Image (cartoon, rainbow, N blue to C red):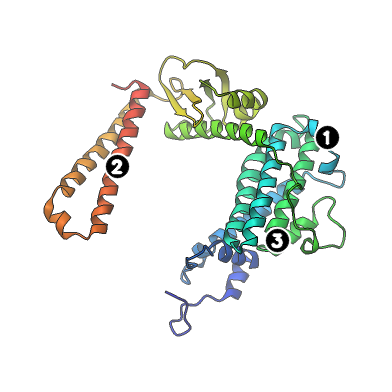
């Protein structure tokens, strides 16, 4: 229902600001402003209502705190870094920054503030924090060469991200920007030039190759979760029918895959013998993780078979219900459609579990 003074269901913005901060309030409202929809807020549960802004503000602060702890007045500017010194990950994050500048500027220009905010959110949280900062940690800590280059790139893309986000979250972006190396003294982010295409560097090859690394790591993580492999357990990896893009990416970033996906041995070639989990990527590359030393095959077969049998029973029960004319004729069409969707979803899950059983060689 709409907020109304007579209904007493309004939300005092000052209370929200006091609890979560003005930036959290602003981001939550802007991110929920999709065209043709209402912003859904629950006055009885402010924590849930303003979680998007609160969580993003906390994440952004942690990103800044971590990175600023490694930067200083001697951090070089990106303009002083030779292109030849950039790694694939460096080129990728710069290409993602370039694409984000174009995307956010276009969305703000069309007054689609929520889409612009979502693009910055994805860049800062997923691209920068989840991938780039994790990839460059050995360089930041000095266990791998190229630390100064990594710092220059990270400082540059964080600066761009803060400027793109400033219209939505002005306070935290101002605070972090003031602490960046090379920020003009006694100046404000609010009067800096808006990012434009060319402030970073477009690089289609880097996007494709590091994107392949992300897909491989994502597939390994999915298999680890699917077969309940212990988080600290290292796995072996085989890539069969690897595409040229995957081969080039692995040649340059094998250490990244080993570290981020906890891989022990990595090889390109045919699938090894024995039970294994597999994922086929969009380009045809087959990601294979042997499971013989990781899980108890007998117990895993029993677990998967039991879950599949349970789902198949639910499907049979649901199909009998849908075959009953009294239910189909009397129930609203929307209810019948929802029940059909349930049956289809359960059937798909059962099929997937049976496929896992076959991959393990279960009888």
Residue 69 visible here: no
Spatial CA distance of label 3 from label 1 is: 30 Å
The residue where tag 2 is placed is: 346
The residue where tag 1 is placed is: 82
Q: Is residue 128 above or below residue 227?
A: below
The residue lying at 60 percent from left, 23 percent from top is 247
Q: Residue 313 location, x and y as percent? A: 21, 39
Q: Is residue 225 above or below residue 155?
A: above
Q: Residue 293 location, x and y as percent? A: 46, 20
Q: Is residue 321 above or below residue 269?
A: below
Q: How many marks?
A: 3
- Of the two numbered discs 2 and 3 on the same chain, state the one appearing first in sequence: 3
Q: Nearer the viewer, mark 1 or mark 2?
A: 1
Q: Nearer the viewer, mark 3 or mark 1?
A: 1
Residue 243 visible here: yes
User: Quick one: SS at disc 2?
Assistant: helix
Q: Indicate which disc residue 149 carries.
A: none
Quadrant assignment for the C terminus: top left
The residue where tag 3 is placed is: 166
Q: Residue 354 location, x and y as percent? A: 31, 30
Q: Is residue 34 left or right of residue 163?
A: left
Q: Residues within 10 Å of mark 2 (few under 14, many from 20)?
A: many
The residue lying at 29 percent from left, 43 percent from top is 344
């Amino acid at each position: 229902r709409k907020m109304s003074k007579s209904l007493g269901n309004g939300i005092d913005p000052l209370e929200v600001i006091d609890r979560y901060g003005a930036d959290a309030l602003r981001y939550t409202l802007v991110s929920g402003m999709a065209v043709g929809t209402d912003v859904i807020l629950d006055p009885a549960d402010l924590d849930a209502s303003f979680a998007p802004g609160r969580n993003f503000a906390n994440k952004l602060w942690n990103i800044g705190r971590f990175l600023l702890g490694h930067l200083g007045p001697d951090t070089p500017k990106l303009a002083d870094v030779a292109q030849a010194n950039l790694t694939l990950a460096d080129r990728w994050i710069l290409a993602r920054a370039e694409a984000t500048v174009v995307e956010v500027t276009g969305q703000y220009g069309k007054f689609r503030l929520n889409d612009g905010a979502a693009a910055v959110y994805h860049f800062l949280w997923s691209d920068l924090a989840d991938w780039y900062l994790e990839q460059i940690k050995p360089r930041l800590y000095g266990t791998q060469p190229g630390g100064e280059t990594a710092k220059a790139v990270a400082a540059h893309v964080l600066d761009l991200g803060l400027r793109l986000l400033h219209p939505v979250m002005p306070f935290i972006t101002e605070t972090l920007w003031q602490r960046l190396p090379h920020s003009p003294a006694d100046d404000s982010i609010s009067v800096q030039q808006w990012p434009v295409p060319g402030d970073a560097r477009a690089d289609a090859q880097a996007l494709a190759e590091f994107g392949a690394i992300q897909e491989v790591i994502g597939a390994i993580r999915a298999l680890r979760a699917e077969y309940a492999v212990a988080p600290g357990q290292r796995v072996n990896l085989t890539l069969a029918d690897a595409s040229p893009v995957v081969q080039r990416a692995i040649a340059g970033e094998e250490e990244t895959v080993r570290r981020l996906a906890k891989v022990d041995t990595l090889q390109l070639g045919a699938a090894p013998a024995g039970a294994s989990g597999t994922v086929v990527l969009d380009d045809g590359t087959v990601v294979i993780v042997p499971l013989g030393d990781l899980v108890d095959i007998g117990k895993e077969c029993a677990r998967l078979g039991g879950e599949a049998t349970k789902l198949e029973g639910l499907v049979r029960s649901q199909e009998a219900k849908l075959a009953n004319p009294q239910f189909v004729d009397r129930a609203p069409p929307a209810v019948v459609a929802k029940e059909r969707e349930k049956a289809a979803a359960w059937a798909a899950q059962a099929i997937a579990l049976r496929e896992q059983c076959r991959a393990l060689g279960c009888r």
